[in-house]
Image (cartoon, rainbow, N blue to C red):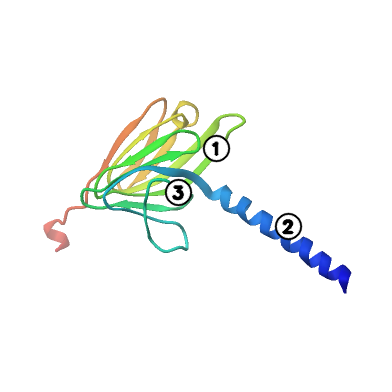
Amino acid sequence: MRFSLCRCVVLLTLICAAVPAFAQQDRVGVVTAVNRKATGQPPDRPIEQLMIGSTVVRKEKISTFAKGQAQILFTDQSTITLGENSQIIIDDFVFDPKTGASQITATVSAGLVRYGGRISEKAGAEFVTPSGSVTVRGGGALITVKPKSVSSSDR
């Protein structure tokens, strides 16, 4: 009995130690600036008000509203800044600190997004919009996605 209790304690300790490592793998950055109302919604979690220091994870939807802005600092020191009424999903982010290699793919569905960082120096950063994709290499980008207008045939 005592032997199996020890085994259970050791197994439970190993599982608890591994949980933060798994959670850390999805962490892609942190919110470094937020002005007024901005929210984040990690996958399978409720919407949360963003604050300076909020963790950003892979597949998280970041939204700003009227007069809202937010800036994300990624683990490779790249940044994305969202203007008001913007929405982005961080589809994928990979960074290897040993080699400095990194890659980002994000979907911009509305608003104004400014990107700048190291990713574009080597691999390129890809932003998918409703009307096409933008790949940034060797610099930064300012991407605007205007709301879809309703044509007379859509009414």
**Which residue is outermost to the bottom?**
1
**Which residue is outermost to the front?**
2
Q: Residues within 10 Å of mark 1 (few under 14, many from 20)?
A: some
Quadrant of the image containing the C terminus: bottom left
Q: Is 152 left or right of 48, judged from the image as shown?
A: left
- The disc label shown at residue 14, or none: 2
Element class at badge 2: helix
Residue 64 on image: x %, y %: 29, 51
Query: Disc count in the image?
Result: 3
| Residue at horizontal 39 percent and vertical 35 percent from the top | 135
Q: Amino acid at mark 2?
A: Leu
99 lies above or below 1: above
97 lies above or below 92: above
111 lies above or below 75: below
Q: Amino acid at mark 3?
A: Val
The answer to whether mark 3 and mark 2 are in CB contact below 8 A is no
- The disc label shown at residue 56, or none: 3
Residues at marks 2 and 1, CA–CA distance in whole angstroms: 26 Å
Residue on which disc 1 sits: 95
Q: Is 40 left or right of 104, judged from the image as shown?
A: left
Q: Amino acid at mark 1?
A: Phe
Residue 92 on image: x %, y %: 49, 46
Q: Residues within 10 Å of mark 2 (few under 14, many from 20)?
A: few
